[in-house]
Amino acid sequence: MAVQQRKVVAQAELKAETKVDAQVGKTWGRDRDVSFGTILISLGILVLSPLWVMYTYISCNAYQCAMSAPALEIYNSPNALEALKQLLIREVPTFSPHAARIFLTWLTFQAVLYAFLPSQIGYGQRTPAGHLLPYKVNGLFAWIISHALYAAGGLYFGWWKLTIIHDNWGGLLLAANMYGYFLTFFCYIKAHFFPSHAADRKFSGSFIYDLLMGIEFNPRFGKYFDFKLFHNGRPGIVAWTMINLSFAAAQYEKIGYVTNSMILLNLLHMTYVLDFFYNEDWYLRTIDIAHDHFGFYLAWGDSVWLPWLYTLQSHYLVRNPVDLSPLHFALIFTVGYTGYFIFRSVNHQKDIVRSTNGECMIWGKPAKVIRTSFVTSDGKTHKSLLLCSGYWGLSRHFNYVGDLLISLAFCMTCGTQHLLPYFYIIYMTILLLHRIQRDHTRCKGKYGKYWEEYEKIVPYKLIPYIY
Ligand code: NDP
């Protein structure tokens, strides 16, 4: 229904009258002018992110997920360099043709599902160059087929063990890294020589920044094979729940049962992931799709960072099984599902107000909206609206409050013995606080005085009366 409404609005927008105004709005979208400091930070992210993923892999694989253990071992050894060398030789995974085959089969299978499964067509936000792109929205179907096949192959046909992902974790990490780097450089070259939408490219003048944040906005093969939607959704988010299940199976194999913490973690993650696919059309109008360009940040991030670090809690629980008391279980369940309820309700309000062009009820009253206009780089003016009642009247990013509560619940399933499983909530807090700033810059550039009006009506960014 929402997809249908959105399609109607999108088509109406396509036909809408436009007028030329070449003065305004040329620069909204991703940064173009980057400072030396930004380039240095970008270099740091490019170098440190893969090292951090490898570090967490080593600390889980060899030190029961004790985060400081590998560093302390090196620090306490009389010859730190030699200790580091020995640790790397011992623990860094080597190339495994078997794991590489599993990864490639998985990737190809997901690409086939994405390209050929029947699909509704969703529309993203209008891009800074004025494109309104169609997307295949068939992620839920792909998720169901992938998980059914994984379970049937493991439990019924005996094609693989359910622990296959856990058992090949090191080799898969290497294969995913190789793919993530390949994709990053491929997209960098593609952006220069055969871009999908040339006018939506952003060149910063810095090789490092462009590699990290991407040049092309919506790289595609053909009309529908969208790199951003595919890589975030399929090798990234479909894999998320499957990795968790494989680690739950490994816990069963190791201790003879699956702990209630592991079950709760799987339940919470699965709720989040299924919500994503059930509402995949909504995702087309979030910052990932509507603002970020496709570089290392998303290409390597979706291939490595997301599947490895978003599932850290299940790696932890295999090595450190936690049996939650009924009270703890109930507390985490409540935090998680309260967060989920907030997250979904806030995002739903935005989607419904946009798809009905503001003609809807929010919390039992007619929606209060600011009617805005913005200009794309082809000089055309378009109309949009900003909701300023309901959750969007409490703060400008109340959906992030819900997300932070869910993230905290994921981590709490691991008890309080170690810091590493809490990496996710720390990371999400930094990511979302930074996103608030990024979104502010974007919306101010896009909406100008309308955004300032919204800021006056809704002064809080995240938590009402606090921030
Ligand atoms: P939003 O979905 O809030 O999208 C922000 C955009 O919405 C703005 O750029 C603007 O774009 C539009 N907008 C802003 N204010 C209003 C308003 N008052 N009324 C209507 N439209 C408005 O943010 P994100 O894309 O960051 O996040 C989407 C969800 O995904 C969130 O719940 C977040 O917590 C979650 N998330 C999860 C991550 C994870 O890794 N697990 C990572 C990041 C986000 P425009 O006007 O151009 O449409």
Image: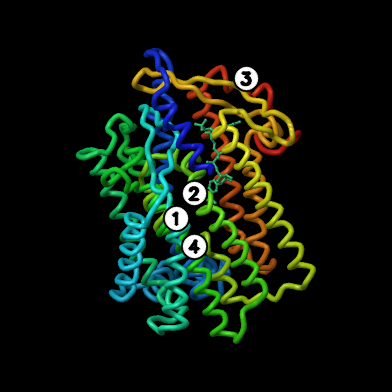
Q: Is mark 1 on a helix, strand or loop?
A: helix
Dot 2, crowdedness within 10 Å: few (<14), some or many (≥20)?
Answer: many
Give, as a three-letter code, the residue at label 3.
Glu
Question: Is tag 3's residue or tag 2's residue first in the polypeptide sequence?
Answer: 2
Question: Is tag 3's residue or tag 1's residue first in the polypeptide sequence?
Answer: 1
Q: Residue at x 39, y 66 (%)?
A: 173
Quadrant holding the C terminus: top right
Which tag is nearer the camera, tag 1 or tag 4? 1
Question: Is tag 2's residue or tag 4's residue first in the polypeptide sequence?
Answer: 4
Measure the C-alpha gap from mark 2 to mark 1: 7 Å
Question: Is tag 2's residue or tag 1's residue first in the polypeptide sequence?
Answer: 1
- Residue 257 showing in the rendered view: yes
Give, as a three-letter code, the residue at label 1.
Gly
The picture quadrant where one finds residue 358 is: top right
Observer-nearest of 94 and 85: 94
Label number found at residue 139: 1
Which tag is nearer the camera, tag 2 or tag 4? 2
- For label 3, the residue is 453
